[in-house]
Image (cartoon, rainbow, N blue to C red):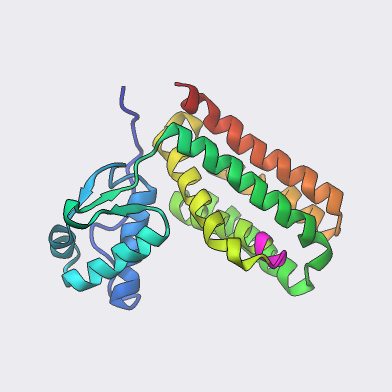
Amino acid sequence: MKPKHKKSSAPHSPPLGRLPAREAVYQWLKRRIVLNELRPGGALTELGLAREAGCSQGTIREALLRLQEDGLVLRAGHRGTTVTPLDPVEAAELLALRKRLEMRGAERAAARATPEQIEALRALYDAMVKAAKANDEYLLLVLDMEFHLGLFRIAELPALDQILVRCMLHTHRSKLWAPAHRRPLAATATRHAPILDRLMARDTAGLARVLEEHLDTIVDVVAPALAS
């Protein structure tokens, strides 16, 4: 049985008036892929997307190249472009890699965090809570990623940033593809509070413990889908 998906409030065309066209088209396509509006494994054509977006094929091509870097599309020359499929084996490996990267970052973050970095994470947490109250699933997802990336970047391991981004994007896509594995939005937001608390206390062992619990819960949520 195919999973049922919630209706999304994503625009049918990019909001070109708010951002430069190239950025707007990239963000529009990224949102549609992450929310699985563009189905895993589905074919994409530059001409078709350009018509839908009301922009040039060059703008679409540039967006697809950026999405390839994110791991969200596969470009295969004359065979065209497809949305990256959701494979259970890859999902398990990416979840394991995400945990390894974030745990290594947590070992360094508590001792290195500046007051400004902690305040930035607190602001992201507050924004997550507001997004959950507004029932804005995609904004909450974006803020969730920014929170985890912000924590990881305190560890100053920049060569690993893009790898972690790919892992997180794939994790979110996998969870959204299977509605039974979603949490209430409020719970998704507030479960970041213990991470922030331990960072503010500069408790290295405590930060590692709560972050591990947080990530293990992600694995537990997705695990039934991997076994099915």
Secondary structure, magenta segment, majority class = helix
Number of numbered tags placed on the structure image: 0
In the depicted view, which residue is nearer to us: 109 or 5?
109
What residue is rendered at 17% in x and 65% in y? 50
Left or right relative to 139: residue 207: right
Residue 123 is situated, as x and y percent measured from the top left of the image, at 65, 65
Asked whether 134 or 151 is in front, the reply is 151
Q: Nearer the viewer, residue 175 or 19?
A: 175
Q: Quadrant of the N terminus?
A: top left
User: Residue furthest toward the front?
Assistant: 77
Image quarter where the C terminus lies is top left
Residue at left 84%, top 64%? 111
For residue 70, what is the image quadrant? bottom left
Above or below, comparing residue 194 to residue 199 in the picture: above
Q: Is residue 60 left or right of residue 104?
A: left
Which residue: 41% across, 54% down? 71
Residue stretch rendered in magenta on the structure: 152-156
Q: Between residues 154 and 76, which one lies in front from this camera angle? A: 76
Residue in view at x 18 percent, y 51 percent: 79
Looking at the image, the residue that sits furthest to the bottom is 20
Query: Would residue 32 be visible to someone looking at this image?
Result: yes
On the image, which quarter does residue 5 sit in?
top left
Residue 55 image offset from top left, x and y in percent: 18, 71
The x, y position of residue 145, in whole percent, is 55, 56
Q: Is residue 139 magenta?
A: no
Instruction: Tell me residue 202's x, y (percent).
Output: 85, 59
On screen, residue 192 above or below 52: above
Q: Is residue 55 visible?
A: no
